[in-house]
Amino acid sequence: MLVVLPLTLLLACSSNAKAPAEVSPSASSAAPTVPAPVDEAAPMPTVEGAFGSKAVITIPAGQPSGQFVIKTLSEGDRQTVSKGDWVTVNYSAKDWTTGKDLPSSYDTGGKPQLFQAGSGQLVPAFDQAVVGKKVGSRILVVAPPAAAFGSQGNTTLGVAPGDTVVFVLDIAEALPQDSTLSGTMTQAPPTSPQVKDNGKAAPTITIPPGQAPPTDLQQFVLIKGEGKQVQSGQTLVVQYTGVLWSNGQQFDSSWSHGGAQALQVGTKSLIEGWDKGLVGQTVGSRVMLVVPPALGYKDQAQGAVPANSTLVFVIDILEAV
């Protein structure tokens, strides 16, 4: 059921980009060796503006040092980002070589970047820069080609082969892979599945004995979150567990995949029951969905899921970007 995160223009070693969904790592050339990061290396760009707003980046006279610089401009007061955390970052960027501003998440239509820290998903300027930093921090990154777009550049962003790129990263959020929601749960009616919270482990879902499965989608908010409302097209970070109504057997769980997962909702990349059941919910909510076959896998078997199965999911909505 899960799908891979949409590919982005900041993918590691990305070549000349087409549409964002078509960008892919280059398979024809080896990734260049990334220099060890340093805190400072003259000459240095200057940055104006506060965390949470687009940065004004001024390029100094002279050529870049060639060093990979990661410098904390202002330190946040929240948790430290660890490798594997799901991190949400807003960013501003400038091409040192040309002096041109690059697309920013603060621009009209721009979007924050969601990725797993230290996983190699994105260019090292993002991937490595956030590990060990605190949420709420503003980070200056001077990325030589090996830490940015290498000898290929990125035509969509306007970065030529071999260009040095300057990023200012605002770390907005970080979620460890074992993140779950807590709080008093409101159980569904006795004729519906019941849920037992197991802390950092997958919840236990018990199917009501003797009850026929519903023919329509059922949604139960077990914990009501106070975050933003989920919108169609957003990427969610979720913990989830799915069982079969027919026998209560678990067939899928984010815990089986290493923890919290990221996926797009409302774009027909998931089963229809998820798109219908999650759009409009709020971040911080634990939701149970009872999905009839027509909104699930219909008459097609999928792995451990037989054809025409009614599915029951418990989903923790941890973030929406």
Image (cartoon, helix red, strand yellow):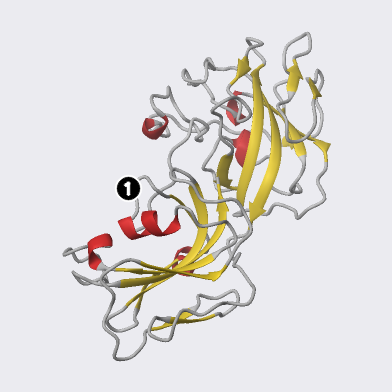
Residue 130 visible (yes or no):
no
From the top left corner, tell me how far across and down residue 56 is, in percent. 75, 20
SS under mark 1: loop
Figure quadrant of residue 22: top left
The amino acid sitting under disc 1 is: Lys
Residue 82 visible (yes or no):
yes
What residue is pinned by disc 1?
Answer: 268
Q: Is residue 101 above or below residue 204?
A: above
Q: Mark 1 packing: few (<14 Cα in 10 Å), some, or many (20+)?
A: few
- The residue at the point 83 percent across, 37 percent down is 74
Image side of residue 9 versus residue 227, left or right: left
Q: Is residue 300 above or below residue 321?
A: below
**Outermost left residue:** 299
From the top left corner, tell me how far across and down residue 247 is, in percent. 29, 84
Figure quadrant of residue 99: top right
From the top left corner, tell me how far across and down residue 176 is, in percent. 62, 59
Q: Is residue 165 above or below residue 31?
A: above
Of 309 and 252, nearer the camera is 309
From the top left corner, tell me how far across and down residue 28 is, in percent. 38, 29
Of 127 and 102, nearer the camera is 102
